[in-house]
Image: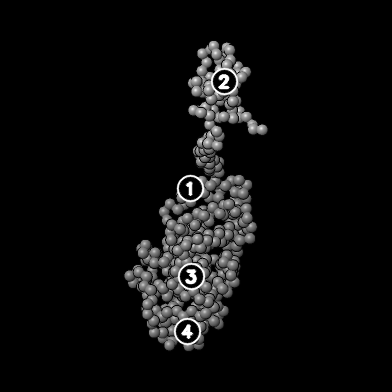
Amino acid sequence: MGISCEEVWRDVSDYIDGDLDPMQRAALDQHFAECRQCTALLNGTRNVIDLYRDQRVLAPPDGFQERLYQRLGETRKPSRHSFLAWTLTAAATVPLVLALFSARRLIVPAHNTQSPGSGPDARQVPETVAISQDQDDKFYHVAGCSHLHGKPKFLPVGEAIREGYSPCPVCIVKRKPAKKG
Amino acid sequence: MLRKPTVEDGFKKGLASAVHESSARAAEGALINRILSGHKESFMELIRPHQRTVYATVFALLANKQDAEDVAQDAFLKALARLNQFRKESSFGTWLIQIAINEARMRNRKQWHIPMLSLTDDKDDGKAYVPKDFEDWREIPSTALERAEIRETLVKALGSLAQRYREAFVLRDIHDLSISETSAILGISPGAVKTRLRRARLMLRDILAPGLGHDGRLGWASKEVRKPWE
């Protein structure tokens, strides 16, 4: 034999690819003619390559193309996607805003001084309020309220509440909190 | 009587192939320009000839059908998103395979239970590989591939190689890319491609030789066989 088996192992891949010069190729041909083991190596390697080249080995599964096109189609329609994203964002935001609003309502009064009973914020109510002496009016008012009719009577707010008067929904309840100082 | 092919025949054949490739590249370029001008529906037409190649590439590298489908889809989506970055220095198919390989590499890195166990020698490429002696190799006919277990065995054998050998084998032997194309895609020298390819081929033969072809099951070489040269 002109060349050793080790040289064949080194060059057998290039031999298969036809990537050897004529002299090297002739040397391998001569070796294969005399060495059964290296011939088995060559045939086995060629067989392996042929098997893997068969398209059935790594073929895509059924429905691959349809699923691919479906996914590509989804990304090609940004308006629908954006609408979905917008809807989801809105759906998540609304409860959040409501929760914050509720929390504010719960937290803010807790820091304020409550009037006796269920009266309004103390900062909204002056110490002295007015009730009507001669009209059937169960509300107490700020002096000058347009809903205060008849002859006014001025009294402390605590006393008005004790007598069963409620805050006027116009001049007391809707009144903005008075700023301190 | 058949005439022996002459040098002139070979030249004509090569010229015809070059002309065909040139016109295909021109058509491909026109299609890409159309997509970039807003006709994204044409992308399906552009990728149709490459679907099998991309899937086969990632399936060979991941050895898992579900992962392969996900990653192949990701690769196509990425190609669509980055189409304006395609420089047309290579063919679109080559560029697409490059994306697919990168996606498969990323998937392998992401999976915490990976790295995939390599059953093969993953040492220095330059070290000589000593093939196992299986003198009684019996040719496996292509008809055997009709059996699903044979196909699965081949995928499993390929998946057992270190990734760098799988990549070289897939590009060169399965997709029939040239050494220079394989070298460009993998970013390694042509010499390194040849070395990895040689080892991949011999290792696959060693893995498949002991059992495949007899009962269709993978029979890993478990014992040293006397080598005639020893």
Helix, strand or loop at disc 3? loop
Decide: is B150 above or below A18. Answer: above
Could you tell me which residue is drawn at 57 percent across and 20 percent down?
A155
Amino acid residing under circle 2:
Leu
In-image side of B160 versus A77 (left or right) = left
Q: Chain of mark 4?
A: A
Task: Give the Cα distance between marks 3 and 1.
Answer: 34 Å
* Disc 1 residue crowd, few under 14, some 14–19, many 20+, Cα 10 Å: few
Labelled pair 1, 4 in contact (Cβ < 8 Å): no
The residue tagged 4 is: A5
Decide: is A181 above or below B180. Answer: above
Could you tell me which residue is drawn at 51 percent across and 18 percent down?
A138
Helix, strand or loop at disc 4? helix
Marks 3 and 2: same chain?
no
The residue tagged 2 is: A155
Which tag, 4 or 2, sits closer to the chain's start?
4
The residue tagged 1 is: A70
Marks 1 and 2: same chain?
yes
Labelled pair 4, 2 in contact (Cβ < 8 Å): no
Task: Give the Cα distance between marks 1 and 4.
Answer: 54 Å
Task: Give the Cα distance between marks 1 and 2.
Answer: 77 Å
Labelled pair 1, 2 in contact (Cβ < 8 Å): no
Helix, strand or loop at disc 1? helix
* Disc 3 residue crowd, few under 14, some 14–19, many 20+, Cα 10 Å: many
Amino acid residing under circle 1:
Gln
Figure quadrant of the C terminus of chain B: bottom left
Q: Position of residue B205 (x, y in %)?
A: 43, 74
Query: Which mark's residue is nearer the viewer, 1 or 4?
Result: 1
The residue tagged 3 is: B162
